[in-house]
Amino acid sequence: MNNIEAEVRSFVSKEQYKKLLSFFKQNAKLLKEDYQETFYFDCESDLRIQRNNFFSKIWMKKGKIHDDHREEIEIKFDKDEFEKLEKLFLSLGFNVQIKWFRKRFEFQWKDITVCLDFTKGYGYIIELEKMTSESNKEKEYENLKQKLKSLNVNITSKEEFNKKFLEYKENWRSLTKD
């Protein structure tokens, strides 16, 4: 069963982002252009809700944030159900820990999903991901690293991602004000 997400990601400059967007528009299939609002809850698990242009969802990723591969559990709802999902989790005693506001372009590049993101207050990111099995996760992760390198993008270290994530977590309210 392919329920493990192997993923590499990197921060990129605005200029790199524009070049990559142009490259993928010419060399990959655009799956969707999306705007996402994602709320992370303050619990032991990586539990989130999201509203995007197409639907709302609850999802949980096992393991630690920024791990190379994690199991994902996802349940989709109608887009209009987002406020009910938030109310449900707040009623259960969870609090919203972080809110993300992201513009995303999602491409199919051969057998890889590529996401180019601009997240308000956080920056520009490229993600390469592939759903795989437990037994293939290391092999797929190494393949994704090579594909990212072929785009002349250096992988951002987990330490840098964790540092930036913690800064955002502490300051997201001010970073996302208009």
Image (tube, rainbow, N blue to C red):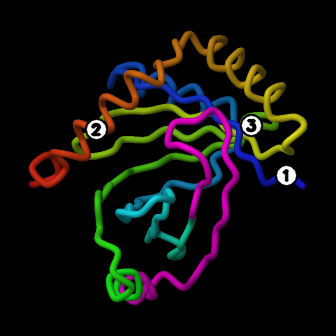
- The numbered mark, 2 or 1, whose residue comes first in the sequence reads 1
Q: On the image, numbered disc 1 is attached to which residue?
A: 2
Amino acid found under the numbered disc labelled 2: Leu
Disc 2: CA contacts within 10 A as few (<14), some (14-19) or many (>=20): few
**Was residue 84 drawn as part of the magenta stretch in this picture?**
yes
Q: Which residue is drawn at 57% across and 62% down?
A: 60
Residue 103, horizontal then vertical, whole percent: 39, 50
Disc 1: CA contacts within 10 A as few (<14), some (14-19) or many (>=20): few
Residues rendered magenta in the picture: 60-85
The Cα–Cα distance between marks 2 and 3, rounded to whole angstroms, is 29 Å
Give residue 166's quadrant in the image.
top left
Residue 134 in view here: yes
Q: Which residue is drawn at 37% across and 22% down?
A: 160
Viewer-nearest of labels 2 and 1? Answer: 2
Which mark identifies residue 112? 3
Residue 108, horizontal then vertical, whole percent: 71, 42
- The numbered mark, 2 or 3, whose residue comes first in the sequence reads 3
Amino acid found under the numbered disc labelled 3: Ile
Which mark identifies residue 166? 2
Viewer-nearest of labels 2 and 3? Answer: 2
Q: Residue furthest front?
A: 44
Amino acid found under the numbered disc labelled 1: Asn
> Which residue is at the front of the view, 102 or 2?
2
- The numbered mark, 1 or 3, whose residue comes first in the sequence reads 1
Label 2: element kind:
helix
Q: Residue at x 17, y 52 (%)?
A: 176
